[in-house]
Amino acid sequence: MVAPLLVAAGLFIAGQIGEALIEGFIRQTTEASTIVGKTELAIQKGFMRDVTADALDSMCEVEPHYNVGVSTDGLMEIVERFMRAVAKASLALTPEIAEELYTELLQEGFSNAVQMSVGGALQSILNTWRGGYPPNPEDLEELARTLDKLDIDLFALLIAQSGCNIPTSAWKVAKGFDSYVEQKHTDLKAQADTALNRLNSLLSLPYELGDNVLSNEIMEIIGLFREAYIRAQNLIEYVAERALSRLNELRAEVKTVEEWLDWSNEHPEQILITPDEAYYVALENKLEADATMNSYNDTKTKIENSLTDLDVDVSGFMTEVDNLLGDVASHYNNIISKSVIDMTEEINMIKEAFKKLVAYRNAKDSQSSLKSSVVLQ
């Protein structure tokens, strides 16, 4: 008996749940269809376009400001016109959809543009009238690099406002101070180099003039050397060509006599030259050829020997150069030895600043006051 009752109860509950689901589905579908229909009608009639255009135009049509872009009254008008857009859009859309659409449009879709205009205007106004941003902890190093532009009280206050603890503040200031000293050293080195270059120019002027004169003379001598070698080479080549030409003539003459002698031996009836005549001609030509070669070798030797006598002594010039370099080096070392950076004042300033920083951090100064001076015992 109990089982049929449970089955009947289950069927009843299931039926009720099914009817609720069906009813909810039909209601949601009907509501969604209504929203779709109203939205489409609003779009077709241009209602949504006008609402959206008015909201977007508000950011450019409101009262401008010469410095921050949008005035405070303009900011209020933008907010009001966006509120009207949400309210009007709710006639076609649900309030949730309208709010999400236009507020997200203002916040997300145009976040960059709004940040540069509306957000920039708000930030400019608040920064101008209530600016209180402290230096970043990273700025501590830059503070130490500009010690010569700060007084002790401002330096200590800025260190305290950066918010770092005392050991971290000391570490960052030390890093910045190292850069400060390095920059001072660089500036001093540049000044010393400039002074050194100018002084060296004055000291080396006489030597430079002498060097120019000597350089010109050396170049002239080198030119003479070159010209002498070229002329000697040309002369040797000329003598060699003359000697070779004469030797070729003598060879041709001997060759001719040799052919005459061969003809005479082959034709006894018609003798052109006798062996004795041929011998004397050959001997004469040999002696002349030897004389020609001896003359060429003698001339060549004399020309080459004359070139060995060409010489230039620059030892005096090199001595002067060595002396000049020694004087300049001594002068340069003297300037470097006297280039000293005194950081006593800056170091004392840092010490005093940290004393003030410790005083700031150990002070007990109530930032709020009691509303009543009456103290109940």
Image (cartoon, rainbow, N blue to C red):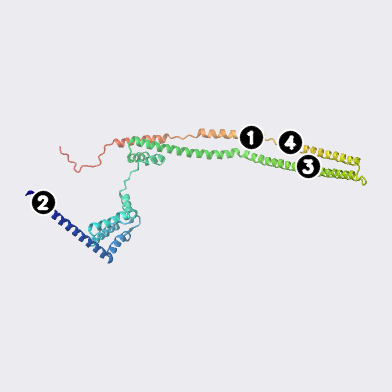
Are the residues at dot 3 and dot 1 in contact (C-beta closer than 8 Å)? Answer: no
Residues under labels 3 and 1: Cα distance? Answer: 46 Å
Q: Which label belongs to residue 320? A: 1
> Which image quadrant is residue 204 in?
top right
Identified at 30% across, 36% down, the residue is: 361
Q: Where is residue 257 in the image (x, y as percent from the top left)?
A: 87, 44
Q: Position of residue 262 (x, y in %)?
A: 87, 44
Q: Which label belongs to residue 240? A: 3
Disc 3 secondary structure class: helix
**Residue identifier under label 4:** 308
Disc 2 secondary structure class: helix
Mark sitting earlier along the chain (3/1)? 3
Q: Which amino acid does label 4 sit on?
A: Thr
Mark sitting earlier along the chain (4/3)? 3
Q: Which label belongs to residue 7? A: 2
Left/right placement of residue 228 relative to residue 206 reads: right
Viewer-nearest residue: 294 or 96 = 294
Q: Which amino acid does label 1 sit on?
A: Glu
365 to 100, vertically: above or below = above
Residue furthest toward the right?
Answer: 269
Circle 2: is it few (<14), some (14-19), or many (20+) Cα within 10 Å?
A: few
